[in-house]
Amino acid sequence: MAKKVGIVGAGVTPFKGKWYEKTYYELAQMATREAVKDAGMPIQDIDAVFYGIYNDIFERTCIPEHPLQGIIGMQNKFGIRVSCGGATGAYTMSAAHAYLAGERFKTALVLGVEKATDCFDFSSMSATPEVIKTIGWSGDSFFEQKIGWSASDSYAEVVLGYMDEYPGTLKPEVTAQISSQLSKQVRNNPYAQRQLDQVTPEEVMNSRYIVYPFKELEICVYTEGAAALILAEEETAKAIAKNTGKPIVWMTGLGEANEHSFAGKNQKNMSHIVSDYLGSHRAYEMAGIKDPIKAIDIVELHDAFVHQFEISLAEFGLVPYESVDSLIEDGIMLPGGRLLVNPCGGLIYCGHAVGASNIMSAWSARNELIKRKLKRALVHGTGSTVAQYTACSILEHE
Amino acid sequence: MAEKKQKVIPDEYIPEVRSRVATIDNQDYLLQNDAMFTFYERSMGELSPFFLAIKDEKRILGCRCPKCGIVRVPPMVTHCPDCDFAATELLEVEQVGKMNTTPPITYFATSMFMDKAPFGRGRVILTGADTALSVMLYTTTGILVPGLIRKGTEVKVIFRDQRVGQISDIYCVPTNELTPAQITKKGLQETELNWEAPKEPEFPKPSNEDVTVYRQSLGEMQALAVEMSRSKRARKAIEGWKRDIAVKTKGGEFAMYIDDGDFKIEEKKLKSPDFIMACEDPRTLLDGLMYKGAITDSVIMKKLWISKNLEFNTIFKLDRLARFLAREKKEQAVE
């Protein structure tokens, strides 16, 4: 039987559109300092580090984690990097959990960092086209990069496939209200990139198309920042918690799946995010959850796009496919509704510092479980082309 | 539509070696122009027959598994992963097919695709194939708008005149824009299509009311331009950008100047503008600048015409200008 693993410390840097003041070295150290402080232990007591860094080009270095080993005080110890597209942070948590549950280590640092907007397009004199070009190198290099593949258009393919199968869902007025609701929730997150950017549904509806059917205020923003968790196996976690007086949030279920990256017979079903279905249900099974609607109190969901946010919740079994808009129409995710989704504002409003994003989501889920005295949260990461990758974890407040 | 001959990295993308200083809270931070670059002479390996067939023969190849019978296009595997890695065989498929799902349309493209936007990219299942080929999608009728191509729409593969053996040598257009002879012809090239040329719209003679609306809108836009030029955040939207734009409306013509953070509107007919915008009702543009509807969407919905597609880039900046001013006002109200 594998050992139980819990979160005993967490920290994030402010998420910003551009950190002129810091390199990724300092951002990584800032989050680490916060996390070990939260866990009340010196870095010397951490056995291993798991880095979540998505894209070498963002950091302008292949093996971008190698300078961090010494900078965060982990020299001469185990260090491994995970890179799984948008789901990097969630997969990094999965990897660290496995090493602790398998009794290789007693404590581990999960450290996500990304410095995205140093990329700059000198022809339009702005960062965004170069940032999305950099992400564009992640598309299939033989068949898709050269015809304009982007993260947005590949996710839009799946969203439109879903709308083909479930016509009348993902109504523009509903996606606009979800974005507006997330912008209200971010108000309570002082680390967020857009803490003061509250928008009305009308503003969302009026924002420009980036990639049809996505409008500007329905898409996550590129961010620079870092996030860190301290994980420990059961006995060590209990000792640390006794010292800090903070409750342990256990990782009781994990599930992952990567789909086929091409569509058609025996390949990817473009009308669903099967990876989200499999990842979440595998995590439920491990956590012993039979009815997720009853069991899950908080979802910290990787909302790359509002439409995908809705589909992911349907794939998690938390809302029916054909009436996914009930999230708003029946008030499921509105204040007083049965589900709290992305109290941190999600990646659309808190920001998407890719390798750090899902780790920030876990930081938020842990805070909310403790603060609101709730039982269970689902943390989710999605990534790669056509929402191919998913990693999910179930967090439980002891 | 022809691909220009160009270097692997076009010159216009390459910045000069230089640095600048950004000052935040009285502290200076150094920003250095930089690049990561690697050149390749990359082998297409087992995919070579597919790319050579496109380049030299204007044919599309797939691969068929003799066990399960699945025909994969593109022919990504030499052995079928579903059938204990049985060896597959190459075969030719048709050049007409149906869209697997409704395709997205990219309006705001990456820095490498700005000159190609707006474009669709979707997946077509060609007749004779079981899997979907990812393709760029265009319409011969102007700007691609939502609804023109949907799931199940029949499309035809078009070959560029100059082909280099890349997937971008082909794209698709809906067959309902082609003649029966074009649909059946194999290896149809882009110069054989009837592309509608962009044509500046002509407006009828203005009524007195049109002129009044024009005057009023112009005044409001000029006042907004002054506010935008004063807003620190709004200025960022047009930092480093310079354009002189002639704007034609039914009620009158004026000029918009964007100059590295400064935004100015004057009643003047420009002789040699960088590009022309034409919209019958000036309130279309006014609403956009007031952040009451995106100017981008006005172009997509054909309420506003621009003389150069590439200037979508400037349109995005004008939308950002409006949003940044609105955001600054909101933040000031909160503080």
Image (tube, grey):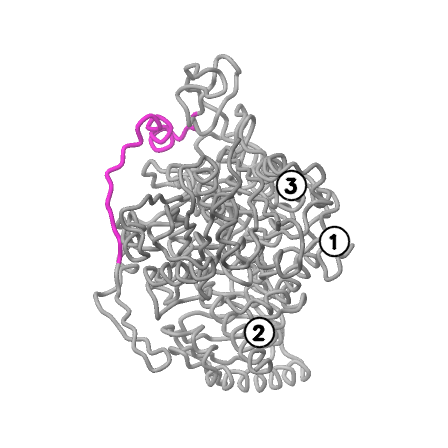
* Amino acid of disc 1: Arg
Task: Provide residue A160's location: percent of width, then percent of height.
Answer: 61, 45
Residue A131, by quadrant, is bottom left
Nearer mark to the viewer, of 1 and 3: 1
> Given this view, does label 3 or label 2 mark the residue nearer the observer?
3
Q: Residue at x 59, y 44 (%)?
A: A394
- Mark 2 falls within which chain? B
Classify 10 Å Cα crowding around label 1: few (below 14), some (14-19), many (20 and above): some
**Depth order, front residue of A240/A95:** A240
| Residue B20, image x, y percentages | 27, 73
In the image, are marks 2 and 1 on the same chain? no
Q: Which mark is residue A315?
A: 3
Res B198 seen here: no
Label 1 element class: loop
The residue depicted at 44 percent of the width and 20 percent of the height is: B91
Q: Look at the numbered disc 3 and give the secondary structure of its residue.
A: helix
Q: Earlier in the sequence, mark 1 or mark 3?
A: 3
Image coordinates of residue A380 in percent, x first then y, are 56, 47
Q: CA distance from mark 1 to mark 3?
A: 17 Å
- Whether residue A317 sits left or right of residue A382 in the image: it is right
Q: State yes or no: discs 1 and 3 in contact (Cβ < 8 Å).
A: no
Q: Chain of mark 3?
A: A
Say if the magenta span includes residue B43. Answer: yes
Residue designated by label 2: B285
Q: Which mark is residue A338?
A: 1
